[in-house]
Image: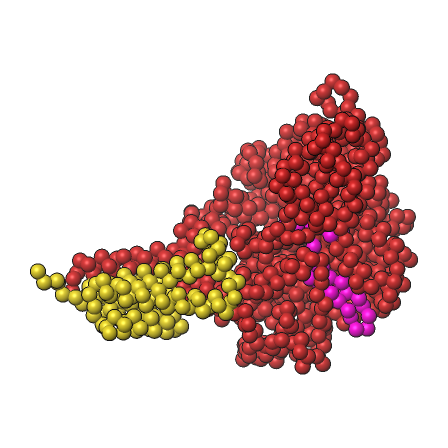
Amino acid sequence: MKFFNSVLLTALLSFIAGIYISYWWFFAVIAFLVALLIHQRGFKAFFAGFLALFILWFVLAFWMDLSNEGVLSVKIASLLPLGGSKWLLMIVTAFVGGLVAGFAALSGSYLRSSKPKK
Amino acid sequence: MRIGPFLIATVITTGLVYGLNKKWGSVPPIGKFLSPQFGVWQNAEPAENDFGADLKFAGLKGKAEIYFDNRLVPHVFTENDEDAYFIQGYLHAKFRLWQMEFQAKAAAGRLSEILGAGKDTAILNFDRNMRRLGMVYAAKRSVEETEKDPESKSACDAYTAGVNAYIENLKESELPLEYKLLDYKPEKWDNLKIALFLKYMSLDLAGPENDMEYTNAKTVFDAKDFDKLYPITQDSLDPIVPKGTVFLEPSVKVVAPANADSIFSSWKNSTAISEIKPDRDNGSNNWAVAGTKTQSGAPILCNDPHLSLNLPSLWYEMQLHTPNFNSYGASFPGAPSIIIGFNDSCAWGFTNAMRDVRDYYEIKFKDDSKQEYWFNNEWKRAELHIDTFKVAGQKDFYDTVAYTIFGPVMYDKSYSGKRATNDKYYAVTWKAHDPSNEMMIFYKLNRAKNLDDYKAALPYLSCPGQNCLFADKRGDIAIWQQAVFPAKWKRQGDFVMPGTDSSYMWQGYIPMEENPHVINPERGFVSSANQLPVDTTYPYYIGGHHDLYRGYIINRYLRNMNGITPADMQKLQTENYNVLAEFALPILLKNTDESRLSGEEKKFLDIVKSWNKRNDPDEKGVAIFKNWLDSVEVEIYYDELSKVTAPFDWPEQYTMVEALLRDSAYSFIDNINTPNLETTADVIMAAFKKAVPVLSKAEAGSKLEWYKYKDAGVRHLLRLPALSRFHLFVGGGQNVINATKDFHGPSWRMIVQLTDKIEAYGVYPGGQSGNPGSKYYDSFVDQWAAGKYYSIWFMHAGDKMDKKAKWKMTLDKL
């Protein structure tokens, strides 16, 4: 339940922050705070942060691409270069967001966790 | 708290954010770039986007409405003229901001700021070239002049305010894609940027100059041979002003310096400068036919300017409607007014005059400090301008340019274009340096009602020289080659001139009345296609670098046409007949001995023999003819030209063809490197045999069809293939009315029939949106490539409920 909640909360708050706060990386702060608030052990926290942004960015990119009828994604995917595959572009996009959020969440988790017992 | 792991995780996170927020070489800042809420995904415009909106701006004076049709062409209705220019600026910025700013930066020599110095400092060199030519100096003088006139000042101010209204309200997520890719932000617009853009057009259209190359050529050739290679007129010339027209006595008497002839033969210093030059085919077609030749009885005006074909396009189509005027046509993102278009009463268009208004003078400095130069028997002080170049990722670069009475010393020891060291100083005199208010010609034409208004608009065009075409509903047609042209003695400015006294300077300017022009001629049409405007009875020296065959074939068609309809004009504007082949192919075939050809060679000869002389997309004869003729040119001239060690210009192909038609013993035919005396047949056969391997290779790659061989496309301004359109199925080419080359050609095709209800057609190879993420980015390209047109909706105030108005934007003052 904790895992699900932190994924949901991170994704939701990151989305809202993206509307009101003009720093693209502000979701990292969100992921950090959520991990601090809903404490989970390192790997789980990382994975929750990663998954939250992976899903959020993938869904957003997918949705925008759908309404754009793929006009832009194919061009960007040849520019970057990802062989013109828009799916690969969406996955790379999602992975970048996920990676930053994962480490931010990890950082939040470590700030609160106590030393593992010997 | 686990301090160690916490620190490590935090450092990794911030490191990631930092790394993903930063541009690495040409890789954009990946995090920022890919973020769906900030980056490039935001540029993915919904296919069913609603362009309607309700907006308020402090800069507006009254209410306004914009109706977009289904091609995203805006029809702007305002209560006063200033608001029309404000909205034009706003719309240009909304749809084309990046390109406007990029072009203004290019003109100002500031590309290194965003792109860095480039490979082999190519971009920094481009910037230095612009500054040394005096682009910013010229633009600043133009702004002063523009702001002296209350009408042009208010138009520019309103336009600039409109651009800035868009920029100020722009969120990071809404930045055009290219800003995100290159990671920079737009700066505020100003009137200087408008002037810079117009000067950039002056430069782009100043293609004909070849002073350096001619100077190099005359180190090897005597006057007689030079004239044979680079003659000043042509046999098959069909000039803009029909032959036989009697010209006015010249009011400006020019006198060649007494030593001009001796200097020609004795002053043989090679310059070794390779200039950064615009495309030499920056030309155009325009013509207007009188009502006597049309089916409707009303004049028809046609224009297609040939320029580099880029995405986003140079042109933005729109209509401006105010209580004072109602005009429609192609506008330049970056400048107010409709540039080529029509209004309720008349239509207008332009082609390039190809005249030489840029000359070079060799300056003698006292020493390398460039502080004093020798002029009229004394040392004169030069003004030293220090230019600062901000270079992305590097230290600032400083460049010192000396300004003399002739103009800026463009080339010196520190800068010689792209070439090796140079120990001379060349100052450039360019008409575009003089104060002028070019935008007023467009301002006035947008409001013109008749021939008198047209004539009153012309004097504002001081540079670049254009063939200004006009037709109105009253039935008048006219063409005027206009600019403030220097009156020159024969060959003045064809070479670099001595700059130690005033004797070689321009002595005066030709009055507008004496510029070549034609009004309502008996033949019922006026036309231009970058050919010489006049025959040699014209009292002033023309100079420059002119086309020949397009003008010849356009006039031949127009003479023979009657009962003309707009559909006939569409066919003519996209005509692929190759008249050069009509002249040249018979000479080639006549001099070919088939018995000496191999099977492979015979195969290509047969194709070209049965070729219909049309540059249609799937013809195979075109590539064979072109390669053969190019190869003949090399055979005939290269032995002589290769003696010129510095950059030189090849003679025009028409010069060679006319020489071969005139004279079977053309002196350049003989190869001076062989003991034998070669004949025309020898060189033509040798040329064919040398061309065949190229053709065999093309055929092996199934690339012999003309459209594949030419491989035309429309390129993104940054030359990014992913944002360009390549491999178009188009015909045409050089010397053909449909002048489509690889990445250059008819950039806006327009046909206007001046019936009571105007009937107009237009198309350009681009789209209304500059955003590669919009379906309107390249939506006209296929229509253009197919030689088809859009029927233009010239909207009137009564049409506001028409279904063609797909989206509506309402605007009001804040």
Which chain wears yellow? A
The residue lying at 72 percent from left, 46 percent from top is: B619
Residue B202, image x and y in percent? 66, 53
Which chain wears red? B
Q: Is residue B498 magenta?
A: no
Q: Residue furthest front?
A: B599
Q: Is residue B315 visible?
A: no
B235 or B248, which is in the foreground? B235
A20 or B598, which is in the foreground? B598
Q: Quadrant of the N terminus of chain A?
A: bottom left
B510 relative to B156, above or below:
above
Task: Read off the magenta span.
Answer: B737-763
The residue lying at 12 percent from left, 62 percent from top is: A116
Residue B276, image x and y in percent? 60, 43
Judge left or right: residue B503 versus residue B662.
Answer: left
The residue lying at 40 percent from left, 51 percent from top is: B24
Judge left or right: residue A28 versus residue B95.
Answer: left
